[in-house]
Amino acid sequence: MKNNANTIKSTKRRLPLFNLHTKKERIWELDFIRGICVLLMIWDHFMFDIADIFGNAWVMANPAHNGILEFAEKYESGMLREIFHPIIFDLFFLLCGISCNLSNNNLKRGMQALSLAFIITAVTSMFDITIRFGVLHMLAFSILFYHIISKVCVNDKRLISMVCLIASVVIINVANVYSANPPDKIDTDLAFLADYLGGAYYDSADYFPLLPNIAYVLLGASIGGLVYRERKTILPFLDKYGWYKPINFFGTKALLIYVIHQPIIIFILSLISFIFITPGNFVFI
């Protein structure tokens, strides 16, 4: 009996150590919405590459491909894209903010994103399509800004949510005022802050200035602090049968997919051109 009691006590002592190594449960609906945003981004860039890079070469090689080019160009300039493109990105920024609220190490997340952003700038500059301040640059600075707010607020979640909400409202209003009445003197070197500081002349293939976009990240952080205070799904009744997992894969790998999807798309389209449409010519190279 004594040995059995000691065994039970020993087992009880080990249980907390076992629990420390359990995998952190993800909130499925956040990955699902993020996955949809990623898939729409891939589609958008796929159409862009055909319309702006490959389409004309394909039509010159064979006029029968004109229908593909026209479809891509109509999508690029169409009302559907004009309406949903900013909505999808703003939604993605909100999700980034919610993730900031759920993360235990935003300094690490921000520095990783910033490092990747600088690598993207360096690589794209080699192909004369330099991304000086794109979406990843903006998100990296936004995450680091949230990290500063959280430290100033001594990690008080309610205070952080309040500060982020106030900051987001102020930033959106200031950005709207200056967008409607831009300053007389602009400095394109400061255009990474806001488009009214010279964004029209800012040399960046992908351009997402801090203002007002950082406001949507902070708004997401504020929402996350209120809605996901318990750090668990708010839609448990839909979390059945794993129907969302194919989409969630793209949501959980969003950063990696963002970095590699364009080279992969261009490689595939170049290979198709080289073999089937423009034999011996990769078009992009």
Image (spheres, helix red, strand yellow):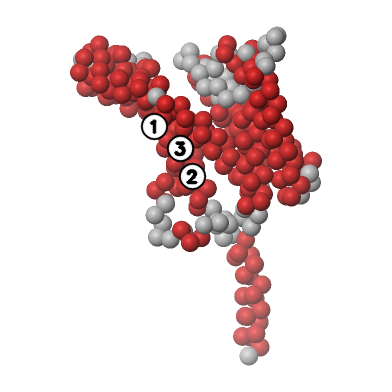
Question: How many dots with numbers?
Answer: 3
Most distant residue in the top direction? 185
Q: Quadrant of residue 107?
A: top right
Amino acid type shown at disc 2: Ile
The answer to whether 23 appears left or right of 160 in the picture is: left
Which residue shows up at 23% across the image and 19% down it? 65
Residue 43 disc label: 1
Amino acid type at image mark 1: Trp
Q: Earlier in the sequence, mark 3 or mark 1?
A: 3
User: In x, y percent, where is residue 35?
Assistant: 46, 42
> Residue at 57% of width from left, 42% of height from top?
95
Q: Is residue 186 left or right of residue 77?
A: right
Quick check: 66 above or below 89? above
Residue that carries the numbered disc 2 in the rendered image: 33
Where residue 161 sits, quadrant-wise, is top right
**Where is residue 36 shown, x and y percent of the image?**
44, 41
Residue receiving disc 3: 38
Nearest to N terminus: mark 1 or mark 2: 2
Q: Secondary structure at mark 1?
A: helix
